[in-house]
């Protein structure tokens, strides 16, 4: 079985109140659109932090982000690959405009922690968001 390292971001901003950014994208495991945390693969030669910044910039155009801490990790099997996921807490500038890569993401929204928990489909993503204080 092949192993693929991936990184995931609980992106938040504080503009009066703390909000979490979710993206809406096609879920490969179930061919449906779901609200998700931003996630992507770690390429050869990259650190997890470099991969996370690259994925954030590629998928939603944010450059002014601050990776604070690794807060959660999990793994799962998909087809013939074991996916290992490291989840990071990432602070974003709420004034920076979001530019979607529409090949990857069909929408995004800033929402409260409770709203995010209500919309997230996958349990591990909910568990990661629960860790946001």
Image (tube, rainbow, N blue to C red):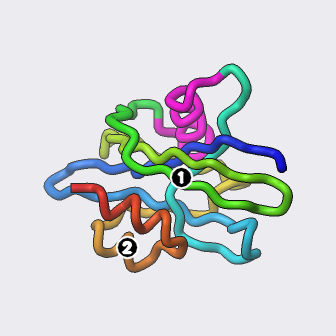
Q: Is residue 112 left or right of residue 38?
A: left
Q: Secondary structure at mark 2?
A: helix
Residue 30: say if magenta. no
Residue for badge 2: 117
Q: CA distance from mark 1 to mark 2?
A: 15 Å
Q: Decide which of tag 1 and tag 2 comes sooner along the chain.
A: 1
Q: Which residues are magenta?
A: 46-62
> What residue is shown at x 22% (from left), y 49% (from top)?
14
Near-viewer residue (88 or 112): 88
In this view, the residue farthest toward the front is: 1
Q: Position of residue 64 (x, y in %)?
A: 39, 31
Would you place residue 116 above or below residue 10 in this image? below
Dot 2 surroundings within 10 Å: few (below 14), some, or many (20 or more)?
some
Residue 11 in the image: above or below residue 92:
below
Residue 49: % across, % down: 50, 29
Under circle 1, the secondary element is strand
Is 95 situated above or below 109?
Answer: above
> Can you name the residue that lies furthest to the left here?
16
- Measuring from the top left, give residue 43's x and y in whole percent: 71, 31
Q: Quadrant location of the C terminus?
A: bottom left
Q: Which mark is residue 38?
A: 1
Q: Residue at x 38, y 70 (%)?
A: 116
In this rendering, would 45 be left or right of 22? right
Q: Check residue 90 in the rendering and tell me which mark sits there, or answer none.
A: none
In the picture, residue 97 is in which quadrant?
top left
For the point 57% across and 25% down, which residue is it?
47
Q: Residues within 10 Å of mark 1 (few under 14, many from 20)?
A: many
Counting from the top left corner in percent of width and height, residue 73 is at 49, 50
- Residue closest to the eye, 44 or 53: 44
């Amino acid at each position: 079985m092949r192993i693929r390292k991936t990184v995931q971001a609980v992106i938040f901003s504080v503009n009066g109140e703390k909000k979490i950014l979710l993206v809406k994208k096609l879920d490969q495991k179930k061919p449906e659109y779901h609200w998700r945390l931003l996630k992507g693969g770690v390429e050869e030669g990259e650190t997890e932090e470099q991969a996370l910044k690259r994925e954030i910039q590629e998928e939603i155009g944010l450059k002014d982000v601050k990776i604070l801490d690794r807060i959660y990790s999990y793994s799962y099997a998909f087809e013939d690959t074991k996916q290992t996921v490291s989840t990071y807490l990432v602070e974003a500038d709420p004034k920076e405009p979001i530019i979607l890569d529409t090949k990857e993401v069909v929408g995004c929204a800033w929402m409260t922690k409770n709203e995010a928990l209500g919309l997230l489909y996958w349990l591990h993503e909910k568990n990661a968001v629960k860790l946001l204080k």
